[in-house]
Amino acid sequence: MVGVRERKRKMVSGLNAMYLEEYKNTGAEFILGAGRFIAPRTVEVHFPDGTTRRLHGTNVIVSTGTRPTLEAIPGLAEAQPLTHLEALELDCIPEHLLVLGGGYVGMELSQPMRRFGSKVTVIDRNQRLMHKEDQDICEAVRNLLESEDIDIHLNVQVKRVSGKSGQRVSITIAQNGAETVIQGSHVLVALGCTPNTEGLGLELAGVELTDRGYIRVNERLQTTAPGVWAIGEAAGSPQFTHISVNDFRVVHANMTGGNRVTTGRQVPYCLFTDPELAHIGLSETEAKAQGISYRLFKVPMETNLRARTLSETRGFLKALVEARSDRILGFTAVGVGAGEIMAAIQVAMIGKLPYTALRDAVLTHPTLVEGLIQLFSSVPSARDVSDETSKSAA
């Protein structure tokens, strides 16, 4: 784990050095301190040595992000639990890691900790892991974790926590009216994020918050205060780095005479388990909720010859195509290289290509993306069905 931690630290320090060099090359000034509004478009910065500096700008961008949520569960705070930040700073392998939360952070840390040698138990209040995904996706993720001997407790309520993480900790859960105690050496909290919007003096700048504590913005990422913008997770944007980067592009365009909005943009995402989960566009759950008719294309990863050569055939590909046209509505993959496969679908969606363009393409063999040919050949096209119906009628 010391080696793992050092690799992570080198990656982070290397990226920080690159970003600081970019600041230097552009002539931008970088100030490291604690800032808060004291008036409209006016920020006061406090430095560790006790000095302050006052700054006033034509435009101010707030990008303070979020922090891991620590829910008011009795004994949880006293247990000094790990969050993803502390988990990535461990210098030892937890004997038994108890993970509170079955979402992104919980999944992406449970699997590697198990592979490092920890016993891992996942505890989630919902009926399914990754509960916002389609049911077949949730089942695939659960099967993946259970195949690696990760214990999973779903649809439970955490009643209390006792002990101290890193030594010995006990979690009492309630399920179906009965209480059970689960014991481990460490506890990891992965219960979502809380926006970092307190203590910024936003009210002094005329910046309003939503009822969930995020900065209120419009589709151009303008706040309720003139000249003040907000980007990233603090603004309630989807919690992905690539969305925060896109937020910057939206604000930059709008500050320099353009007119760019966040509404209608694609939000691709990837869960970096092994194998991966990747998604773009509409899911089946969303399509049904919105009353959108679709055709479902779905094939197992074992039909992909590249997946076979990699000896990793777990998972599947599936796509939604509009019922009365050949427009791709959405795509989800659970499998090796899922994120890279998804990118090909996303480019097709951006270009408004029909799914048949991918079905009829000549893609390199054997590659993972070639599996899209099998996927989109798995269901007859609307035209083929229409032709067969006409023949039958004749």
Image: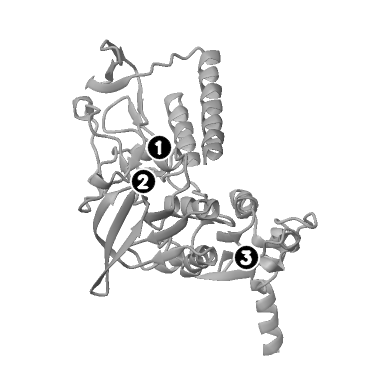
Could you tell me how far apart the alpha carbons at marks 3 and 1 are, in whole angstroms? 34 Å
Circle 2: element type:
loop
Q: Which quadrant of the structure image shows residue 286?
A: bottom left
Q: Which quadrant of the structure image shows residue 100?
A: bottom left
Label 3 CA crowd tier, 10 Å (few <14, some 14–19, many 20+)? some
What label sits on residue 333 in the rendered view? Answer: none
Label 2 CA crowd tier, 10 Å (few <14, some 14–19, many 20+)? many
Q: Amino acid at mark 3?
A: Arg
Single out the residue that lies furthest toward the front.
167
Q: Amino acid at mark 1?
A: Gly
Could you tell me how far apart the alpha carbons at marks 2 and 1 are, in whole angstroms? 33 Å
Residue highlighted by disc 1: 232
Residue 354: x %, y % from top left: 65, 59
Split into 4 quadrants, where in the image is the C terminus?
bottom right
Mark 2 and mark 3 in contact? Answer it, CB < 8 Å.
no
The reply to whether residue 211 is in sight is yes
Which numbered mark, 2 or 3, is in the foreground of this view? 2
Relative depth, front residue between 154 and 19: 154
Left or right, residue 11 beside residue 107: right
Residue 292: x %, y % from top left: 46, 67
Which numbered mark, 3 or 1, is in the foreground of this view? 3
What label sits on residue 166 in the rendered view? Answer: 2
Left or right, residue 97 beside residue 295: left
Q: Amino acid at mark 2?
A: Gly
Could you tell me how far apart the alpha carbons at marks 2 and 3 are, in whole angstroms? 34 Å
Residue highlighted by disc 3: 314
